[in-house]
Image (tube, rainbow, N blue to C red):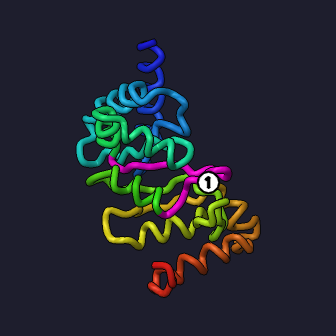
Amino acid sequence: GLGAIEDYVAWIVEHVKTWKPDFFCPFNEPGMPSKRLLKIAAGVREALSDAGPSAPRMVGPDVQKVEPTIGRFEVPGEGEELVNAFDIVTAHNAEGDETATVAAWRRLATLSGEHECWATENPRPWSVLNEEGEEIGVKAVVEAAAAPPPSVSGLVLYLAFPKCVGPNGKLTAKGKEIAEGLAAAGRGDMAEC
């Protein structure tokens, strides 16, 4: 009910005001309908309106997997409203997400309109191919980011510690592979870019 939404909004707002992050997402792979997400996002935005330009940027919706996120944004009327509820549009791509292709990330970036688009909670190694032979690893996000705008502009690696950086503070094999791929992409010498 509405009380549960108000309680949730209050909890998120308390967290944001206490910890003062630069970015925050009120959701983590939410299984709730978009209309509920919109009510929560609007409540959080209103409660933080007194912060003015110093308010942290709200990212979301962080729906699990790229295609289901795209699907939410393609609902007439509601999709555009959902995009506009966030400062930065985001999607998680879980280990089993076979849809996290370059084309899907580009589609999500296009649907994001004037908003930045980030790949958040990416658990993959640098390169992984799905059953169709399409790239779905971190490399897919980087290739989508290398395309002309609109493009993906942010990447968050899931479990960077301990999967990419070990307890000794050094890069793991997976971390080295991703770092080398990111460095190569920064030099513009990726053949596919």
Residue 23 position in % (x across, y down): 42, 49
**Which quadrant of the view contains residue 107?**
bottom left
Which one is in front, 76 or 80?
Answer: 76
In the picture, measured across the screen, residue 34 lies left or right of residue 174, that is: left
Regarding residue 83, the answer to whether it shows in the image is yes
Secondary element under disc 1, as helix, strand or loop, is loop
Viewer-nearest residue: 189 or 28: 189
Q: Where is residue 127 drawn, in percent x and y?
A: 64, 70
**Magenta stretch, residue numbers:** 87-102
* Residue 169 located left or right of residue 185: right
* x then y, percent, for residue 81: 29, 36
Q: Is the residue marked by circle 1 packed among few (<14), some (14-19), or many (20+) residues within 10 Å?
A: many
Which amino acid, by three-letter code, is at mark 1?
Answer: Glu
Furthest-front residue in view? 132
| Left or right side of 155 for 180 | right
Question: Magenta segment: does it hold 164?
Answer: no
x and y, in percent, of residue 72 in the image: 42, 38
In this view, the residue in front, 151 or 121, is 151
Left or right of 151? Residue 168 is right
Residue visible at 38% across and 41% down in the picture: 73
Q: Residue at x 56, y 43 (%)?
A: 64
> Badge 1 is on which residue?
98
Above or below for 54 versus 26: below
**Residue at 32 percent of width and 32 percent of height:** 78
| Residue 162 quadrant | bottom right
